[in-house]
Image: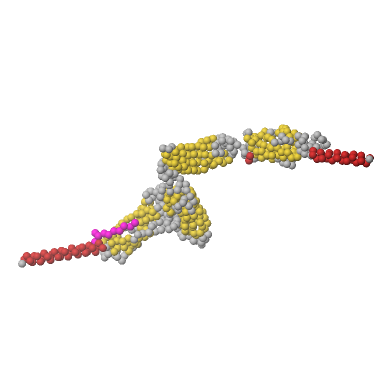
Amino acid sequence: MITKMESKISNKGFKALFAIAVLMIFLTALVSADSLTVTSPSTLTESQNASFTITVSGTSEWNIVSPIFPLNINLDDGNGNTAVLRLTTSDVLTNLNSSDQVRVNVSVSSIDSNFILSSRSTTFTINAQNASNPSQVITSDVTLNLAKTYCEQGSKGSSLEITSVKDEQLDNTKDWEWGPRDNIELTVRVRNHNSSDVDSIVAYGLYDFKNDNFVLEDQESVTINQGDYEDVKITFQMPTSDLNEDSYRLYIKAYDDNEGENKQCTDKFDSQNYKSITIKREKNDIQVEKISVPETVQCGQPVDIKMDVVNLGKKDEKKVKVTLTNTELGLKQDFIVNSLNKGDSKSVNFNFLAPTTVKEGTYVLKSSLSFNYNSNRDSYDQSKSGSDISLKLNGNCRLTADDVQILVDKTNAIQSGGKAGEELVIKASIVNTGTKSATFNVKATGYDSWAKLGPIEPQTFTLEPATTRDVLLHFNVTKEATGDNNFKLSLESNGEKLKEQTVSVPIQPKSGFNFTGNSIINSDNWYLWGIGLVNVILIILIIVIAVKVSRR
């Protein structure tokens, strides 16, 4: 009997313990059902604040115990620059239930001017404590994102808007895929929503976000009429070195030049604050850059041309050959560069004498590059044209026809003579139209059929630039000469003929009756005199015959 009673008591105790255990599990489940939820805040900028909301769910009341607001959070950009984020709330943080919300506002309190142009984030934890049971804590993580914008103080105002940016594919064949030394042209459309004209600045920069620096920056000025837009052309050449693949961003901003960037500035286009740029590199690629050439060189003087050879390819080069040529100067020089690793550059020097046998002027030297060297064949598998180099030669150079003029005035060229059998004196004027002093030698040819050459006064002389010298040429005209006769007047300098000109001289026959001369009978009219003589003889014969007949 006692055993049965003990068994009943034992069963009742077990059931009670089981019920208590179930209740504890249920209560634990109730507690664990409470949770803390935090909304995701929007991205922060220097001018754009963010906020997030804290809510609890469940049946218990909760106190937010950490962090303590207001709160400052330091955000580092990885390069030693800091932004301070300020978190504040005016809501109650205690005895929160499911019907309560806490709104936390976030702003940028300060930011270093060199803070990287990129997005940076920081995460912290919000802890809530059960108001009735402090040992129970629920948590939730919050991530804040900060984007440093191209506008110095973030986007300001609403007057200006960048509505589109177009890659015109000047050298590149694919949008936003650029290579070293590519010429880039962009069209940036900026709209003015203001009720008055705006003098605006459109600034741009290519930013290496891995190294936190701009590899190029520039700007254009434009006036945009009220309510209108302008298409701004941006052109630049990509740098040749220090380009890392897939680490570049193009930033563009437009701001009011009069009000200032801190009042009117926009840097958003295509729904974002930058455009990602892909750097295209060839497997093997060599370029020349930083070319140094003298401004001017005198003929006969040494020429020193320097340049850097850069390996822009993805592979190291065992050997590179740089060739400089110009056929007019008789120039062809090679320079060998050994062991040019990818990304490296080496200096190249060309030295030669400017020849004295060429005229003054600007000469284009062609450079060419041979690379991807094959040691087995001792040859280069690839070659390409390099940059053209302009070399200006001035001084001690060969004269040209453009440096001198021969002037013969038809109305007063004959100083004396002009008749057959007499001395003829012709005046010519020589003009130095060049830029330096020169010595000239005067010669005459092509006169043998009608005259013999006498003295030329002076035959050799020196002329300063922009000066003139008269020259007298003496001819002994033959007695048979008549009509227009020609000779060639030429100028030489340093033994080289510069210019030649044909001069026409009218010769009159000698006056008087002279059968042996050519005043009356000459080679041009002798047949007329013959016909006349025959006619005279015929008339005489007719008269003689008529007289004889009449006498019969």
Is residue 416 among what the camera can see? no
Residue most toward the front? Answer: 552
* Lateral position of residue 519 relative to residue 283, left or right: right
Where residue 3 appears, x then y in whole percent?
A: 6, 65
Where residue 219 appears, x then y in whole percent?
A: 49, 52
**Which quadrant of the figure has residue 155?**
bottom left
Asked if the magenta segment contains residue 20, the reply would be no
* Lateral position of residue 233 relative to residue 120, left or right: right
Residue occupying the point 11% across, 64% down = 10
Relative depth, front residue between 23 and 525: 525
Rendered view: 5 above or below 413: below
Q: Quadrant of the C terminus?
A: top right
**Which quadrant of the figure has residue 86?**
bottom left
Residue most toward the top? Answer: 455
Rendered view: 354 above or below 50: above
Q: Quadrant of the N terminus?
A: bottom left
Residue occupying the point 40% across, 56% down = 45
Rendered view: 228 above or below 513: below
Where residue 92 appears, x then y in whole percent?
A: 32, 63
- Magenta region: 133-143
Residue occupying the point 49% across, 57% down = 189
Relative depth, front residue between 144 and 314: 314
Residue occupying the point 79% across, 38% down = 526
* Lateral position of residue 245 relative to residue 522, left or right: left
**Which quadrant of the figure has residue 358?**
top right
Residue most toward the right? Answer: 551
Where residue 336 appears, x then y in whole percent?
A: 46, 37
Numbered circles on residues, count: 0
Relative depth, front residue between 160 and 71: 160
* Colouring: secondary structure
